[in-house]
Amino acid sequence: NNILLFGHWFRKRDKQGPPELEDLRAFVMDRKAYWGDEIALRVFADRFKVVVCVVLQAEERLQVIFPPSGGATALFYLVLTHRGRVPHYRAISVADRHVLPMDDRSNTGPLSETYITPGMVSRLREDCPIGWDCHLSEPALSFFTSQNNAEISTLRHPVVRNSYTLKEVTNQNVIQALRNSGSAMDSYAIGGFPEGTGFVERIVCSRAEPNNPSFTISKTPGDGDCLFYAMIDVATEAHRDSLLPVPEELQDAMGEEGKLTVERLRQLVSESLTDTELAFFKAANNFI
């Protein structure tokens, strides 16, 4: 938890008085301390005008991060896995793309594959029903609404998982032992798909759709930079294919190769922090 990590990090600095905004910004720049989180996702969503769709593998459900100032024109899927207490983000490409514009003209690939299907929109509406109307651009909202015609509920049932392996546990004695050790996770499992269907397809798509796109999960290091590497995949593609507006403050940093660095993305997040975030971090750590 970055909020509590900040408290430990600041106290180790042995600095007099409560933390200031410059301390929180320094924490985000520390690659050994700060793991990318929802703050980073909100900044990224806002700067690139994209809705970040997080596939929660352990819970088998979706979470979305909207750009706070609205105007989103595309979707971007991420996987979030927790191994114990350690989060691991990885980017997902749909067919051959990370960036999925909400636009009829861009929704079909070179091999006639569909990037955003009605079933995918239905799943997003099912797990995340609020916020679309006020956070999408008008053209994107028109596209999104037109795709929402697969009203078939998801088949899911409650399960208990081992929080370290994410495997479902059915033996009651083992479940009790896991609960006693704090290693049990109450979750759900989605059904209705053919045996062997990947977890991304089961969570992202509708069981009613016959032709779902293919999904590929990127390989990123299991460290505090994993989210930023996933962001680099999206930013590089957005720049190369002109699929999203690249923030002015990043255009020079990307250069001719169109490649960002983890350090520059951390800086983007760090510079976006305000006294509002500082007050939250201070209160959570009992700093007066």
Image (cartoon, grey):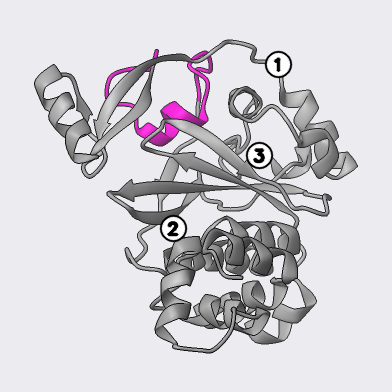
Q: Earlier in the sequence, mark 2 or mark 1?
A: 2
Farthest residue to the left: give it.
Answer: 173
Q: Over which residues does the magenta segment extend?
A: 191-211
In the image, residue 270 lies at what x, y percent? 63, 76
Q: Position of residue 39 (x, y in %)?
A: 61, 60
Characterize the local packing of mark 3: few (<14), some (14-19) or many (20 or more) Cα atoms within 10 angstroms: few
Q: Residue at x 58, y 10 (%)?
A: 152
Answer few, some or many: residues within 10 Å of disc 2's Cα (few below 14, many 20 plus, some between 14 and 19). few
Residue drawn at (34%, 27%), measured in percent from left and top? 186
Of the residues shown, which amino acid type is indicated by label 1? Answer: Asn
Residue 146, placed above or below residue 208: below
Numbered tag placed on residue 108 in the rendering: 3
Residue drawn at (39%, 13%), measured in percent from left and top? Answer: 192
The amino acid type found where label 3 is placed reads: Thr
Judge whether residue 253 is colored magenta.
no
Q: CA distance from mark 2 to mark 1?
A: 38 Å
Q: Which residue is mark 1?
A: 149
